[in-house]
Image (cartoon, rainbow, N blue to C red):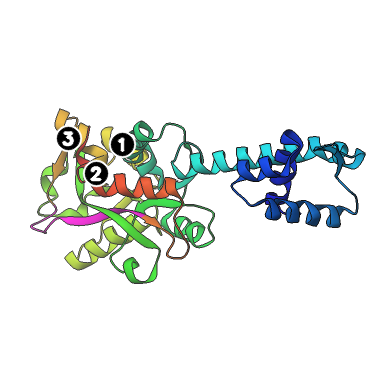
Amino acid sequence: MELREIRSFVVLSDLRNITRAAEALHLSPAAVHKQIKMLEQELGARLYEKAGRKLRLTQAGETLLPYARNLLAQYRETMAAFEEWKEMKRGVLRLGSGAGISIIVLPRLLSTFRAGYPEIEVTVDTGSTASLVHALDEAALDAAMFVASDAMDALGPNIVASWPYRIVAVASRDFGGREGVRNDPGGQPFVLFKEGSQIERAIDAYFLRLGIRPRVVMRFDHAEAIKSMVRIGVGIGMLPQWSVSAELASGELVEVKIGDAAPLTSRIVLAVRRAGILPPAVQGLVEIARQSKDLLDRD
């Protein structure tokens, strides 16, 4: 049963004349007649019979008509919904994010996205870089925002936007040992990220290059927890600059130098799957991300 046959049947039921139905459908009378015959053949019943110069529905036709109208209505609703999806007036965007990024950075990106596409439903799952990359590979996420290494470009997901940043050593304003960090960084207490995270691997490699073995007194999996411990003077934290910009600006925390080392840098990326076609909502997010060069500098 073809949709065009159903449409011809419904139009013919309204007009009761094959010539007029053909004109309404922009078909030839022969084409309409053929479609009706094919429908009757499939159903095994006559749908029309002559009544003078007009046609009228048989009992089989009367039985079919409300269902045929419903099918056409559902088709129109389906096509309208699909057009809205293409125009990003509806749909779901499944995002993944690192925990700290989801609190500070991701809202900045999503505020711009929501302003342009308010009807798109956005869901966000948080996790480690490894878990987010796996979720992208399994098509469980449409896009993800996380801390990435340079080596990920060739082997991992498709990175579509990138924001470099510094990882800074910070201490409370009243932390007594911060003046000794330059000369004896290994002798100072550090509050670092939990081992195994992407950012902690970068920090470990940084200390290794400097020949420093930090005295770690606490580890956490979240920048906000590290920041809280640094605030009360537990030790020195190694944190993304974007996560402590407000505290550095207010003087609540201060940046300390680790010897004469060059700054440690990393980057946040937005990534999508390498395979498959990006849904319109994801394409919209990618375009906004590429235009958001100042994402890490916003208040």
The magenta stretch spans residue 56: no
Give the percent coordinates (x, y) of residue 223: 34, 42
Decide if residue 204 is in sight here. yes
* Residue placed most toward the observer, 33 or 96: 33
* Residue denoted by label 2: 292
* Disc 3/disc 1 C-alpha distance (Å): 20 Å
* Region rendered in magenta: 258-270
The magenta stretch spans residue 269: yes
Give the percent coordinates (x, y) of residue 81: 56, 39
SS of the residue at dot 2? loop
* Residue placed most toward the observer, 33 or 131: 33
Please state which of the two labelled residues, at mark 1 or mark 2, is closer to the viewer.
2
Picture residue at 46% right of the left edge, 45% below the top: 86
Picture residue at 85% right of the left edge, 45% below the top: 47
Residue 143 appears left or right of 169: right
Residue 268 appears left or right of 19: left
* Residue denoted by label 1: 108
Q: How many marks?
A: 3
* Residue denoted by label 3: 248
Q: CB atoms at circles 1 and 2 under 8 Å apart?
A: yes
SS of the residue at dot 3? helix
Task: Residue type at mark 1: give it.
Answer: Arg
Q: Which numbered disc flags the more N-terminal residue, 3 or 1?
A: 1
- Residue 147 lies in what quarter of the image? bottom left
Give the residue furthest to the left.
Answer: 260
Task: Residue type at mark 3: give it.
Answer: Leu
* Disc 3/disc 2 C-alpha distance (Å): 23 Å
* Residue placed most toward the observer, 103 or 53: 53
Q: Which class describes the residues within 10 Å of circle 1: few (<14), some (14-19), or many (20+)? A: some
SS of the residue at dot 1? helix
Residue 57 appears left or right of 113: right
